[in-house]
């Protein structure tokens, strides 16, 4: 007779299923899932790299784009009304946070296929670029504003103002430097932005969003969506609350489509091909006042001279 104290398993133990880690988008200062519940999967490009398992990335929808626009518009007044010096201080703080997460950002870029040397150079360049735009913040008005000589008993002054909400389609590569180089010129002058991160390496974009969240940048100033540029780009180009759009993509058909869709609401659309994207890696061509001037409105004021 069998010993009743011993129990024999009727079936082999089930193997524990591995559930992919789920990442979130950054909208209104919070990390959110896509309204649609859809996602796509990304895995590490190199064997043996850290965090190489498959992860779920939210697939942004039309509703997500509308929500991000609302968050950007809500933050616009508060951000544009801050002093230029204060905006510069906040960007300096962002540079400090990027520097503090240097090793993690390098690991993320290596995981996406970059060599360690290239990843280190890209993170260093991103920190330097953030510092550069932080230093430019309180000098923009002096560089762009002008006194217009007129023949009459009045003065004429031209002053720069923020354009409003700017949508950005970030380049696929460089993943981190591309985000820094396309977002900071927009927000340094008081604009807010909705950004579609590159589809190839969205995990680096999420780490960058964590840097935004732990810096002093107010929620809603930068809103980052993940998903397909072909789906989200046209929605942002047609949205009448978006004042301008900048697209960094080698896809000629998408650039043409965005320019056509943006014309319907008379918004300023600037597109860049592969050559323009390559310029972002250059220390001289990848930054400058011209990147900021694209999203400024110039207001002329006439004032009596008192004669």
Image: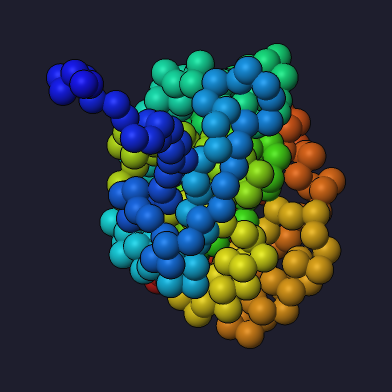
**30 lies left or right of 158:** left
Q: Residue at x 67, y 65 (%)?
A: 230
Q: Nearer the viewer, residue 223 or 96?
A: 223
For residue 175, side relative to residue 203 (left or right)? right
Quadrant of the rendering where the N terminus is positioned? top left
* Nearest to the observer: residue 117 or residue 151: 117
Quarter of the figure with residue 10: top left
Displayed quadrant of residue 68 = bottom left
In the image, what residue occupies the spot 29% across and 56% down?
A: 78
At x 50% / y 48%, what residue is drawn?
57
On screen, residue 27 above or below 12 = below
- Rendering coords of residue 238 (x, y %): 58, 78
Residue 58: percent from left, percent from top: 48, 54
Q: Nearer the viewer, residue 253 or 299?
A: 253
On the picture, is 286 further left or further right than 52? right
**Number of numbered markers:** 0
- Image check: 198 left or right of 78? right
Q: Residue furthest bottom?
A: 264
């Amino acid at each position: 007779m069998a010993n009743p104290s011993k129990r024999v398993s009727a079936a082999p133990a089930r193997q524990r299923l591995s559930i992919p880690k789920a990442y979130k988008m950054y909208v209104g200062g919070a990390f959110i899932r896509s309204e649609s519940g859809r996602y796509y999967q990304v895995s590490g490009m190199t064997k043996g790299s850290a965090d190489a398992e498959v992860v779920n990335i939210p697939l942004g929808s039309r509703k997500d784009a509308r929500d991000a626009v609302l968050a950007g518009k809500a933050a616009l007044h508060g951000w544009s009304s801050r002093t230029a010096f204060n905006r510069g201080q906040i960007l300096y703080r962002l540079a400090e946070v990027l520097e503090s997460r240097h090793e993690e950002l390098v690991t993320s870029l290596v995981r996406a296929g970059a060599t360690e040397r290239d990843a280190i150079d890209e993170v260093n360049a991103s920190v330097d670029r953030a510092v550069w735009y932080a230093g430019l913040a309180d000098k923009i008005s002096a560089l762009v504003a002008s006194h217009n000589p007129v023949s009459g008993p009045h003065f004429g002054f031209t002053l720069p103002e923020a354009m409003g909400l700017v949508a950005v389609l970030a380049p696929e590569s460089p993943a981190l430097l591309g985000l820094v180089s396309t977002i900071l010129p927009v927000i340094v002058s008081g604009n807010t932005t909705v950004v579609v991160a590159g589809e190839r390496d969205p995990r680096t974009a999420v780490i960058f969003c964590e840097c935004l969240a732990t810096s002093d940048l107010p929620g809603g100033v930068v809103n980052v969506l993940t998903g397909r540029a072909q789906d989200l780009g046209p929605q942002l180009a047609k949205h009448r609350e978006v004042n301008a759009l900048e697209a960094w993509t080698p896809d000629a058909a998408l650039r043409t489509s965005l320019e056509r869709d943006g014309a319907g609401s008379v918004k300023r659309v600037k597109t860049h091909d592969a050559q323009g994207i390559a310029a972002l890696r250059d220390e001289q061509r990848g930054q400058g006042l011209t990147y900021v001037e694209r999203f400024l409105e110039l207001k002329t004021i006439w004032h009596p001279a008192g004669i």
